Amino acid sequence: MLSRLGHRLLAGIAVVLGVVTLTFLLLHLAPGDPVDIMLGPSATAAQVSAQRRALGLDRPVPAQFATWVGRFVRGDWGTSITKGRPVRAILGDAWPATVRLVVLSLILSYVIGLAVGVVQAARGGTRTDTALSVVTVTLFAIPGYWLGLMLILVFTYWTQVLPAFGAAGLDADYLTGGRWLLDRLRHLILPLTALTLIGIGGAARFVRGAMLETLTQPFITTARAKGLTTRRVLGHHALRNALTPVVILLGLSLPALFSGAVFIEAVFAWPGVGRVLVEAVQARDYPVVMAATAISAALVVAGNMLADILAAWVDPRLRASA
Amino acid sequence: MSRLLRDRRAAFGASVLLIVLICALLAPLVTSGDPASQRDIVATRFVAPLSSDVHGVFHPLGTDRFGRDVWTRLVYGARISLGIGVLAVLVSLVMGIVIGALAGYWRGPVSLALLGLTDFALAVPRVVLLLLLAALWQPSTALVIAVLGLTGWMGIARLVHGEVRSLAARAFVEGAVALGARRLRVLARHILPNALTPVIIAAALGVGNAITLEAGLSYLGLGVQPPTPSWGNMIQSGRDTLVNAPWVAAAPGVALVLVVVACTLLGDALRDVLDPRTRQS
């Protein structure tokens, strides 16, 4: 198990390095650079070349890349070209918001999705199953940003019960204790609901499939023949075995959830990594894009590894084969 | 086939897709006028659904802030959105089948390199790559198709790889080789046709996915550029008028959900019918 983890870790680092290299090449191959955006169309050629030299953009691309990697590894992530703030400070402010949103939504959507999927499998083929299938397939199909807009329409504009933009109110700095918490929670509800509802669709569909597949296995027939109650067969025998693919999916869905969060953050002006990334890409803010890409690639790799570890924890057979 | 026709999911999915397709193909017949035309903006903007503007023109889904008919834009947008979805999946299919087949049939360094490439591409955060590619080059419809296609082939490559590997060991393939057929011919004539079932299912699901992603990119302003209507940029422009005219953002969203649901149900039904292992229910 440990040696396999070591292998995975090495492969993961290689993937992150590859993604970072690819990003760097794309940034530098694409037409246009940040200096054009910073100085505008009226800048003279001399101003442009002076600015390019100041940012180190006049050096050969491989040299720029080597410098960037060296600095990044040592913790110097550079300074944002558009904002003038250190990249670490920008991302340091942003990542807790994204992690809060993504982790909470992951937990909620899997708890609810698991429950819905098990109920569907237990009543396979009945009207309950069909009705829930209609709901989950629809949730699965809804684009997050559109669901977000519709939630804003209903809860912010029409009924005016929940705030739609940002992670805290304008007066957040003056709130303390319970009122501060309430303000934060009220801002969290809509983005979290949007992200969770979509997650439930995918999770429930998958759980239902895994459960139905497990229920056809001979050991389930044996358990039934032994006279166990349906509840025990489902909970103790079927669910445990259906859990392996579900847990693997959970780890694998972390990157997808992060991708979904990019759009949700854009809709709700949620101050997370996704929004930082979208803004930075549009402004050609090289240092921010590079750091944000490296972090999201690391997140994807970590999600895959987490899936492996969790799967081995749930299913002892996977431990033996390692 | 008859099993497929009796499946309610397949029937629903196929009819939704057929209706949307017919509307999109016959757009000039089912709508009135040009999707980008703007006349007398002040008098015709924000007309509510199911009512007529001051000129007596009926708008089934209302008008947007430029007085453009939402239904007309929705139908012309379907051409763009569906077209992008289908073409992007075609690009993914070609790439995935070629890479998967080569990796599955030619063992050795080629296979290892291709599988490594696939694993690497799978680990790249797709949305990050989409954002980069779409933001760095001038946004256009062709770019969106290329970007979605180039980031969507890995699942198909893996499916094809697995199928080809298991088929390559079967007796009928060994027979073909023994009869002296060339390797490429064996691959194209004997192996691939038998490996396509899961690929077709993945493609059906992929179209829905590609349409959603196109809309997401257009929503961020990185996809199809206005005034050309796509469902994504319609939702985006509806966002700004959410209070005055919620129907502008709602209509393309509902259309999108319907089409994606249809693709998903059709894919599910196809899998159940084509894959004998799940035929128990």
Image (cartoon, grey):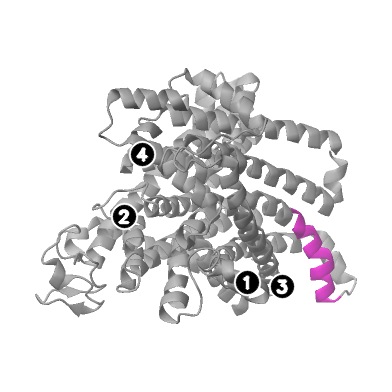
In the displayed image of the protein, which residue is found farthest to the left?
B55
- The residue pinned by badge 2 equals B230
Where residue A310 appears, x then y in whole percent? 78, 51
Amino acid carrying label 2: it is Ser
Residue at image coords 57%, 27%? A68
Q: Secondary structure at mark 4?
A: helix
In depth, the one of A208 and A279 nearer the eye is: A279
Disc 4: which residue:
B143
Tell me the kind of residue under disc 3. Answer: Ala
Viewer-side label of 3, 1: 1
Q: Are marks 2 and 3 in contact (CB under 8 Å)?
A: no
Q: Quadrant of the image for the C terminus of chain A?
A: top right
Query: With B194 as the anchor, is A221 left or right in this view?
Result: right
The stretch in magenta equals A229-244
With respect to residue A250, does B72 lie above or below?
A: below
**Residue beneath label 1, please?**
A180
Q: Are marks 4 and 1 on the same chain?
A: no
Tell me if label 3 and label 4 are in contact, CB under 8 Å: no
Say whether marks 4 and 1 touch (CB < 8 Å): no
Query: Circle 1 sits in a helix, a strand or a loop, which is it?
Result: helix
Marks 3 and 1 on same chain:
yes
Return the residue nearer the eye: B50 or B54. B54
Q: Chain of mark 2?
A: B
Badge 4: how crowded within 10 Å, few (<14), some, or many (20+)? some
Judged by depth in the image, the label closer to the viewer, 2 or 1, is 1
Residue A235 colored magenta? yes
Question: Along the horizontal axis of the image, is B40 left or right of A217?
Answer: left
Q: Quadrant of the N terminus of chain A?
A: top right
- Looking at the image, can residue A30 be seen? yes
- Residue A272, x across and y down, in percent: 55, 54
The alpha-carbon separation of the residues under discs 2 and 3 comes to: 41 Å
The residue labelled by disc 3 is A122
